[in-house]
Each structure stands twice: as C-alpha cells, then as structure tokens.
Image (cartoon, coloured by chain):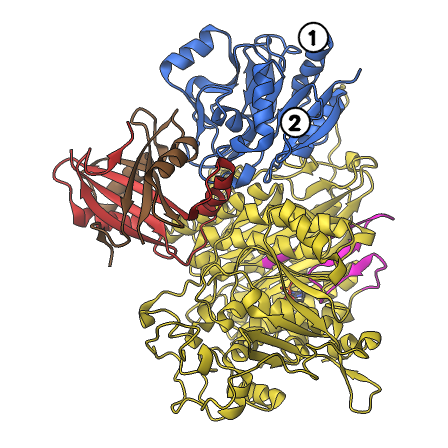
Chain colours: A yellow, B red, C brown, D blue
Amino acid sequence: MIERSEVMGQPEPALADHPSASDPTTAPGPTVDPVGQPAPAESPVPGQAVPVGVADELPVNGYPGGVDTVSNAGATPGDLQPYAELGLRDDEYDRIRQILGRRPTQSELAMYSIMWSEHCSYKSSKVHLRQFSEKAPPSDRMLAGIGENAGVIQISEQLAVTFKVESHNHPSFVEPHQGAATGVGGIVRDILAMGARPVAVMDPLRFGAADHPDTARVLPGVVAGIGTYGNSLGLPNIGGEVVFDSCYQGNPLVNALCLGVLPVQRLQNKAAAGAGNVVVLLGAKTGRDGIGGVSVLASATFDDGSEQRRPSVQVGDPFMEKLLIEACLELYDAGLVVGIQDLGGAGLTCALTETAAAAGTGMRVWLERVPLREASMQPHEILASESQERMLLIVSPEKLDAVLRIAEKWGVPASAIGEVTPATPAADGTTAEPGRLLVTWQGHTVVDVPPGSLVDDGPVYARPMREPADLILLQADRAETLPRPATAEALRETLLRMIASPNLCDKTWVTEQYDRYVLGNTVLAQPEDAGIIRIDEQSGLGVAISVDGNGRYTRLDPYNGAKLALAEAYRNVAVTGAKPVAVTDCLNFGSPEDPGVMWQFAEAVRGLADGCAELGIPVTGGNVSFYNQTGAAAIHPTPVVGVLGVLDDVAQRVPMGFARTTGNDHDLIFLLGE
Amino acid sequence: MPRVVVDVMLKPEILDPQGQAVANALPRLGVTDVSSVRIGRRIEIEFTGQPDLDRAREIADKLLANPVIEDFSIRVTEAGDAEESHP
Amino acid sequence: MPRVVVDVMLKPEILDPQGQAVANALPRLGVTDVSSVRIGRRIEIEFTGQPDLDRAREIADKLLANPVIEDFSIRVTEAGDAEESHP
Amino acid sequence: MTARIGVVTFPGSLDDRDAARAARIAGAEVVPLWHDDPDLHGVDGVVLPGGFSYGDYLRCGAIARFAPVMETIAAGARDGLPVLGICNGFQILCEAHLLPGALTRNQHLHFRNRDQVLRIESAGTAWTNAFQPGQEILIPVKNGEGCYVADGRTLDELEATGRVVARYLGGNPNGSLRDIAGISNEAGNVVGLMPHPEHAVEALTGPSLDGLGFFTSILKHLAGAPA
Ligand SMILES: Nc1ncnc2c1ncn2[C@@H]1O[C@H](COP(=O)(O)OP(=O)(O)O)[C@@H](O)[C@H]1O
C-alpha cells in the first residue's frame, strides 16, 4: 500500500540506537511461555466447550497457562483455527500465516479478523475511494484529511474545525437506544482525537415505513438514544434527517455527524512516536462489550460453558465520555500528549496497531494492566472488546504523573499499559524496519506482529461490478407518465396527501428531544436547512453544516444521486451566507459481494468525487457502511453527504423563510435558476 | 392484595453506569465497604383478579425487559410480605 | 454471595407515568386483567465483607431514595434465592 | 463594586459556560467554582447550572447534593446567600432540601426542548426583581425530568406565600403540578427554575433577551443589599 511506505519513512533513528530491555528484538519479553510444556495432545476445537475451573492456572481451551502463546503457535502449526467463522477467507488466512511465518495465536487471529474486516480495512471500497484524493481540488485550508480520524479545516489564523459523519446502522437495529447512543459516542471521540472540543452533532436517519410495527420499536429508541447521549454530553443537535422508506425496514440507517473546534496549534495526531514513551489507556474499564464477533474463539471462559450470551451490544456511558472530553482537552492544553487515538469499533486492537503503524514504531503491551470489568476476560477478548468511552494516549515518561493527575481530577481511570519500542534496525544497520507489536498476558507472549500488517497491508479487492438488471426498467418508468391532478379538487387532495406524508410532515417530535441551545452558540438549528454554530464570540466567525442524501434518487441513478446529495448540502450551506469549504460523507450500501451493489457504490463515489471537483471543495473524511440489507434485498444506495461552510460573521446569516419586515416596504421575491 | 413483582436487572456482563455512579459516590457518604452496586427496575403488577404468573411473565418478556441486555425474575408477593419495610 | 437489595418505589400518591405507559400498552398485547403497574428501582449492594443492613439503610435513606417522593424497603438475599427465576 | 457571581461546575455540568456568559453580559464578574472545592472564593451569589451532574444517574441532583461545594452553598443559602438553580441546579436544590418538593420524570416520558412562555408570578426574589409581576417572558425549556411535584399542603403554602416564582403558559411542557416552572425559599434568596434563562440573553442565539432579567435582578439585589 502506498500509505505504508510514507509512514515508514520516519523511523526514530536516535532512539533506535538504544534498544531498551523490552525491545522485542533483543529481549522477546520476560519469562515468555512455559517452555517444555508439551503442546496439548489434541488441538483445541474452538466453538466446543471445554469445562474448566480456574482460567489462569489450568489449561483453558487446551492451551498451557490458559492462553494460546506465540511459542505454542510455533510448536503447533497444524492446529485448526476457526478463521472462516471469524470472516476470513482461505487466502486471507494464508496471508496471515505468511506474514507471521507461523500460524497466528488466538489473539492474533482475532486481531487480523477485526482489522481485515470490511469495516476496518475498507477492502472493497479502497480502490474507489482513492478518487476523493485524486480528483480533489488543492486546498490550503486542510490540515488533516482522509486517513486521519477526521478531516481538519483551518477557518482563521488561529482556529480550525473538524467534522465527520459515521454510521452505526447495525447495532441500532439490534438495540436501537444503545446502538444509536454509542454511535454518537464514537463519532465524538473521533473529533476529540484530533485535538478538538466537540461543539455540535447532527443525525441523518433512515427508517422503514412509518406505520410498520417495528418502526415503532426502532425509531423512538434511536431518537432517545441519540438524544440521551448528545444531550448528556452538552452538544447541541443542529440538524439531521428523518426519512421513511420500506427499503430500510430491516436495516435502518443511523448516521451521526460531529463538529469540533480547535486552536490550530492544538492539532493532535495518532502516531506513537518516540521509543520509551508510555502507552496509556484512558477512560472506562474494559468489558465484554461487542466481542460477539470473536466469541467463537472463547468457548471455555465461562464456567458453565456453551450457552453464555455474548452481547454484541455496547452500552454507552455519556457521563464518562463527558469526563473523557474534559480530561483530554486539559491534557492537550497542558501539552502532555504525544499521540492519541480513540478506541472505536475495533477497540484496543485498532488503537494499538494504528498508533504504532502511523509512527513506524513498535509497541510493548502488558495486557494484564488493562483495567477489566470482568476479571475472567481472556487476552483475545481484551484486545477485541468494543467497550465505549476509552482513548489511547502516548505520553513521554516524565509527563506520566501529570497525565495521571489530570485524569484523576476528572475522575477518569487511567493506566499505563505499555511502551513504545524502537523501529527495528535492518541487518545492514542503515535503514530501519518498522517495529513490532508485542503483547504479553501474565508473562505469556500472545501477540508478536508487525503493526502495519494489520493496518495497511490488509486485503484489497476490486470486486466485480454490474449495473443492476432492473435499472433500465426503473429508469423507463418516468415521472412524466404519472397522471397529474387536473382539477382544483384533485390538486387539493394531492397537496394534502403530500403534507401528510411522513417524509414531509413536521419532525418536531424528533427534534424537540434534542438540546439545541447548550453551549450558547447555536445560531441556526432545526428546522433550518443548515445548522450554524458560532465559533468565535468576539469576531462572530462561525460555520454552517448541512447533511443530505436521497436514496430513491440514487437508486435510479447512483452517479447523479451522489452529486445531488452533494449539491443539496452545498446549496443549503451556501444560502445561509456561508462559503462551502469541505465535505464529509457516509456511504450506506448493501453487500459489496453483490455486483449490482458494487456498481452502485462505484458510481456514487465517482459522482461524489466529480461533484467535489466541479464545486472545488475536498472530501476530508467519512465512512463506508456495507452489508445494509435484509436477506438478498439491499437498501437503496444511500450516500449521505455533509458540507461545511464558513461565515466570517454569523450575525450576517440568512435564515430560512421570509423575514418579518417592520417598515412598510415589501420584500421582493425572486426565483433563481431554471 | 397479592401482586406480581418483576425484577429486571442488566445482564451481569453489561455495563451499568448508574450503579457505578452510585458506587463512586459512596465514599463521599463515608461508606467504604461496598464493592459493587447494580441498579435495575422493580415492577409491581396488580391484577384485577388472581395474580397470573404466566401472564406476568409474558408481559415482562415482551414489554418490561429488553432481552438483549437485561434478565428478569418474577414472583408473587403479598403486600407487607417478608421484606423488611422502612417505617 | 449474599447481598443487600434495596427496593425504591414512588409513594402511592405520586403519579408514575412510566408505570402508566406500560399499563396503557397492555391491552394491545391482549392483556386486560391488570389493574395497575408501578415501576421503581431495585438496587443490589454488595459489600466487601458481611452484608451490613444498617449501613445499607443509611445509604438508602441518604442517597438511594428521595423521601419526598419515594419509599424504600431493604433486605438481604442470597444470589439464587427463593425468587422464581427466568430460565 | 462589581458583583461576583460564582458558577459551579460539577462533573457533568453542561450549561456552566452559558450561565457564566449570561452573568457576564448582565455585568457581573464571574467566578468559576469547582464541585470538589468547598471554598466559595468570596462570591456574592451562586448559580447552579444545567446539565447532568455526575451523570444524573439514580435521580437528578441526588449525588451532586453531596459535593463538598454544596455543603458551603447550603450553609450560605441559609444565611441569605443568593442561589439560582437552573434545571439540574433546581433538582440539586430540591435534593439538598433547600427548596421543597422534587422534580420527576416528564409525564410524557421524553426529553423536551422548546421555547416556552412563562409568567413571572413573583418579582420579589433576589433573582426576579427586575421583572414586573405577571410579566410574560419567552425562554427555552429543555429537560427530561422537570415535572415538579410536592404534596398538596406544600403547594398551597408555596402559593399562599408567593413562592411560586414562574409558571408555564400556553402548554405545560413536562406535567409540573399547578404549571410550576420555578419556586423560591421563604427568604427569596434561593430560586429554582426549570427553564433556561441563560439561553435567552443574545438575539443571535436565543428566542428572546428575556432571560437576562434573572441576571440583572441579582445585580440589582446585590447593589441594594447592605454591604
Ligand atoms: N466515504 C469516505 N469518504 C472519505 N473518506 C473516507 C470514507 N470512508 C472512509 N474514509 C476515510 O478513511 C479513513 C478510515 O476510516 P475509518 O475507519 O472510518 O476511520 P476511523 O479509524 O476513525 O474509524 C478515515 O480517514 C475516513 O475519513
């Protein structure tokens, strides 16, 4: 991958000269594995319960010491591993073995399966998303772009803003309230990780038919979840969408956008630079949240085995997130952070590998130092856990105490769990290879991998694409052929029907559950077409944002549908008086393995990239959500596009609707465009 | 009158921010010997006739508990039963 | 392990909109023989040592219940006690 | 001398900056107070802002009541220190028994944010003397647990002694008994208000400027009060 070589261009030569004791190349970890202990006679069959007493002493899953170690993996190359159940293909599993020169341990297998998933690796979308960078107009405002946690745009000499939209569709169908709530929590941490104070949220939503019984379960839960989380964080909700269409019946879309503000010099990055620096886990304790995906690896960690539920549901704690925000901002302002990364869907696995890969360094992690909610958790569970409200910090050792003090002031747990290790000197002593990620669990080495292999070297697919067979028919069924109301009475009835339709009627029931006033800088919010936030109280500098998408239109014409979404958001921002400067997008589609869906996706991306080039504004970040379907039926392709614009003085904003004039002059009404 | 009581608690592995907040507040009150607090819901159902456990179980399952994150238990009590009541 | 359970219920004269909402939803499930539903909190407290009823009563009185609107009752249970559990 | 108004930040406070801004716009010097610090730093009045102190788990305001700063504030309030509790602040004042009654779950069970008309029922408190009795004002309301309840005797007494400070007009947003939006203690120095005056102090960001009256009131009160 291209990005890889760039990241590796910056080793830490000075520190590489002083490999520490924990450098994996010189000292492969203390005590390592119980050598000499025979490999279990029978290879463990994951998924099959092995009754077991005390996890840490007796062989669990048949592994000595309770865990599958690197040396054990080397000694038992023939063990069968449930890679297929974890979503890895045969060739992907072979790649992993090739990279490691042995079979992966349980923990490593869990990590690769997560990082090489569609969700984390963008393996089906990568080849298309490149266009966003390739076609992007040059922008000297962009301080961080695609590849970072969120794009950052400079809006004045001192200030920058960051914004991004992300999906939490599937969790929100399973448990609407918590799914939607943790969706907000996740995007807020992305914004926080850039060094910004989150200052507003928006929520583009799609539900099934308004009168379907399941909508009565999903919609109130989603809205309450977004409300509870956003309100509790003190983030004004300044806009979003509520769209009903039966194609979303079994797969609602819950997208969340967050806006943040930072002084330019407070910009953070995720690189775990500087060997010897300390890796700190900040925030909530780690529990068995969202480890459903890797549960196939752990059949014997519960005493009574098999039937124990593995919740794939994460429960959010907005209070902890609020404290996390305040603690992080204080840490940034005190200059105590070298690198920072939020823990999102892929938990520690993603944060450890991404921060190390971004710096080309290695990392040494003592997993038993991770504070746990449940003591019986296994290493692969700790690595895969999606527990919310956590951040990973890289701090220099002499500042560790100050960091812990600020964490304590805000009541946020913080633990040093590891340290950054140098890049590996090459054999000839000149160039350096990236370091390795070495994770131990109570003295056993459970992970020893090149971090970049999880982050950047994942599979990339150019999946087959084919225009859906029914598209011609759909396109032939033109609006012009529909009967038009011919009489006044018919016109009246059409109008009434339209006004009464769920997609057009008042959304106050939803929006009044959101706090729009908190922070005192909301200049425009619902029902305006764009939200406006004042950023600088002195100068009146502010930003306008709108998020829009039209699945029906995109179904008929994905290329122009994406452009339409962009144009709508762009217009909505422009008419407030703001100058549009940046784009974020959430691409909600069906299964990429369906050539018809893949075609829709490719067309939509091409349309969005072309549209951005024509309008002269860059995509700064976003998110892809695939597999939005029920059985074989995909949702309408639904690219949701957010546009951000800048106002030099928010007092000059133009609100929607006609202004009440005080004098006796009448306003003139003009229609612009064709 | 006898009634049915349904206790709904978060599954043990699910985060309980409420309980945690209370546990963290206890030292303020000078209480230091509490190791964990979990907070759930207690629902009292009164029937027009005889308390109907099966009916109550059905209600709990469909309406009172969220099976994705919660467990429930169910029993019949007399008002003023064995529980020690606050004066 | 034994623990202390504190049940906190709204006083009978205080309106319980949540309980009412559940009661109102019951006919839609075909349940017509319920006369009232009240929803309160169930709080389980685990102590580091022996469960301490007096201590728990003090916590309940100061923090867990608001005497203006709520009553509480308190008891020690064994995990897996007499309550009929959901399978 | 400029009046010094303290604004308390509890973990989970959200409208603390807004309250500070409103007090500043009214002309006060703002002193940030911290939940864990019992020292009031010589302030002349205190605002307990909106938000979700300590997450507002269990009951709103139940845990905040035990914060070290609250002990000092409670003692001060009994000696006449002006205290305004807005939303979560109102909940805290009730939990701390500085005001009677309690705030419970909205009757419709939803969080509700809207612009709300209020009638000022009592202009005799430290925080409402800049209003006319009976004056109608428009300020935002936003809460999930803003339904004021108290027993009938307490309600009667509040009404008989002029301690209902404001009532909801044109629709009760949360089911509060007798449409009560705010009350005061007997001396009138402690006021609890569910709606948010601090969100109606600038034309650009609020539905009106009506909220400013609460903050100019306290300045007026302090200016008139013997030093
Ligand atoms: N549709 C998209 N448009 C633009 N950028 C995208 C899109 N999807 C993903 N990206 C970018 O790819 C990177 C990886 O995305 P993601 O995995 O969502 O980030 P994170 O690590 O914060 O979860 C991010 O920088 C994101 O902005």
Along the viewing direction, whichever of A649 and D145 lies nearer the viewer: D145
Where does residue D205 sit, x and y in percent of width and height?
69, 32
Residue C52 appears in the figure: yes
Where does residue A546 sit, x and y in percent of width and height?
67, 49
Q: Which residue is mark 1?
A: D225
Q: Secondary structure at mark 1?
A: loop
Q: Secondary structure at mark 2?
A: helix
Where does residue D13 sit, x and y in percent of width and height?
60, 36
CA–CA distance between discs 1 and 2? Answer: 24 Å
A138 is within the stretch colored magenta: yes
Q: Are the residues flagged by discs 1 and 2 in contact, CB closer than 8 Å?
A: no
Does label 2 point to a residue whose CB lies under 8 Å from ligand 1? no
Instruction: Name the side, left or right, on which A268 lies relative to C74.
Output: right
Q: Residue at x 44, y 25 (%)?
A: D102
Which disc is residue D198 wearing? 2
Q: Which residues are magenta?
A: A137-166
Q: Earlier in the sequence, mark 1 or mark 2?
A: 2
